[in-house]
Amino acid sequence: MRRFVRRATNRHPAQSYPDQRRSHPARSITRAVTAAAPALLDQHGVGPSTAAALLLAAGDNPHRINTEAKFAALCGTNPIEASSGKTHRRRLNRGGDRQANRALYTIALCRLSNHQPTRDYMTRRIHEGKTKREIIRCLKRAIARQLHPLITQPPKP
């Protein structure tokens, strides 16, 4: 019992410096993502945590997701018809991996804030009469389409 209490009260030197403690997991996540899908981190708005969430959604065998539509369904970004009467629209799927959906949402917001082609896309869709929510749904699907080949291709040795 004394050893347990002594161990619990003795602080590890790395724990006395919070910056070192926080940066260590981030570096290991970055290394793991780079080993699994090196081109994923080169995309605009994709950071280590969002890339890790997308890779976790793909699982141990990403080749089972052979189309971008399957990847979009896995992430919950595939559109579902929500038309009624004369109104024709689509809504976002509520199923799928919520962490992967959140990662795509984070990437979409990052791109909307500082990526000029995405801003131009949003302006064009607003003039077409789309709401911001519908535009983000379309963006998430487009991002899933763009990132699918980067996730499913095997890393080069």
Image: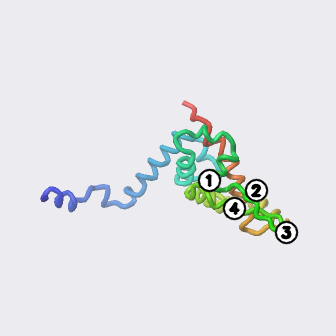
Callout 1: few (<14), some (14-19), or many (20+) C-alpha neighbours within 10 Å?
many
Give the mark toward the camera: 2 or 4.
Answer: 4
Q: What amino acid type should be assigned to the residue bearing mark 4? A: Leu
Q: What amino acid type should be assigned to the residue bearing mark 3? A: Gly
Q: Earlier in the sequence, mark 2 or mark 4?
A: 4
Residue under numbered circle 4: 92
Q: Residue at x 60, y 45 (%)?
A: 40
Give the mark toward the camera: 3 or 2.
Answer: 3
Q: What amino acid type should be assigned to the residue bearing mark 1? A: Cys
- Where residue 26 appears, as percent x and y from the top left, is 46, 52
Q: CA distance from mark 4 to mark 1?
A: 11 Å
Q: CA distance from mark 1 to mark 3?
A: 29 Å
Q: CA distance from mark 3 to mark 2?
A: 34 Å
Residue under numbered circle 3: 85
Left or right of 88 on screen, residue 34: left
Q: Relative to 61, does residue 2 appear above or below in the rendering?
A: below
